[in-house]
Amino acid sequence: MLLRCCLFLTLCFAHPVFAQSRANWAGTAAITFAGTSTLHDWAGQVAAQPFTTVVVSDAAGAPTQISAKVTVSAKAMDTAEPKRDENMRKAMKVTEYPLIEAAIDAAVGEVSQDGKTPSTLPMKLKLLGKEQSVQGRISQWKLVGKKATFDLDFDVSLKASGIEVPSVLLLIRVGDAVKVHASVTLTQP
């Protein structure tokens, strides 16, 4: 009887309905960020560290789940203005919190309305040790062969992130919203 049960379970779970595949896609992201102040707007750039995106597909090959952890060195953020960079790194406490992390773990239904073209990307963003939910907007999606490229845009609130930027000369203040844009490339081996 035990042998029959084991054989039945083996056959059931070997059936294609239960088969899932996992594919690791190598990822890169070039990131720009921009904000405002009472004096002038400002912008900068940083590259994400190379990362892996895991795509889980069903037996028919349709993606069902995606996950990734993207890391950025806060110290590498560059506005091309040394004094501003120094103040930014101080406000972001880069010695205490050297990394900015985005964790993605989403069902394809959360990312794509039609199951083919992604339009949103829910993620958990960790800045200064604080995690917050962020909804990214995907545009310029292209999948050619084993390479996917897209743009990702989202806003970050300095206040919600715990980043306190002191005013300069009591007159110049930095706006709360920072616009983040990432040009992402994923390559399947």
Image (cartoon, rainbow, N blue to C red):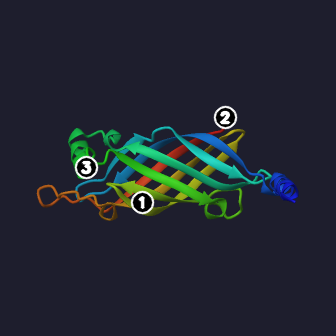
Foreground pick, 25 / 156: 25
Looking at the rendered image, the quarter that the C terminus falls into is top right
Circle nearer the N terminus (1, 3): 3
SS for callout 1:
strand
Q: Badge 2 is on which residue?
A: 189
Residue appearing at x 42%, y 50% in the figure: 101
Label 2 Cα neighbours within 10 Å, binned few <14 / some 14-19 / many ≥20: few
Alpha carbon separation for disc pair 2 and 3: 37 Å
Circle nearer the N terminus (2, 3): 3
Q: Which amino acid does the dot numbered 1 rest on?
A: Asp
Alpha carbon separation for disc pair 2 and 1: 32 Å
Alpha carbon separation for disc pair 1 and 3: 20 Å
Looking at the rendered image, the quarter that the N terminus falls into is bottom right
- Identify the disc placed on residue 155: 1
Quadrant of res 71: top left
Residue 108: horizontal and vertical position, in percent?
65, 59
- Whether the residues at callouts 2 and 1 have beta carbons within 8 Å, the answer is no
Label 1 Cα neighbours within 10 Å, binned few <14 / some 14-19 / many ≥20: some
SS for callout 2:
loop
Residue 31: horizontal and vertical position, in percent?
44, 45
Q: Which amino acid does the dot numbered 2 rest on?
A: Pro
Circle nearer the N terminus (2, 1): 1
In the drawing, does residue 148 fall left or right of residue 75? Answer: right
Foreground pick, 119 / 172: 119
Residue 140: horizontal and vertical position, in percent?
60, 50
* Mark 1 or 3: the one toward you: 3
Residue appearing at x 17%, y 58% in the figure: 167
In the drawing, does residue 57 fall left or right of residue 3? Answer: left
In the drawing, does residue 143 fall left or right of residue 75? Answer: right
Q: Is residue 187 above or below residue 163?
A: above
- Identify the disc placed on residue 93: 3
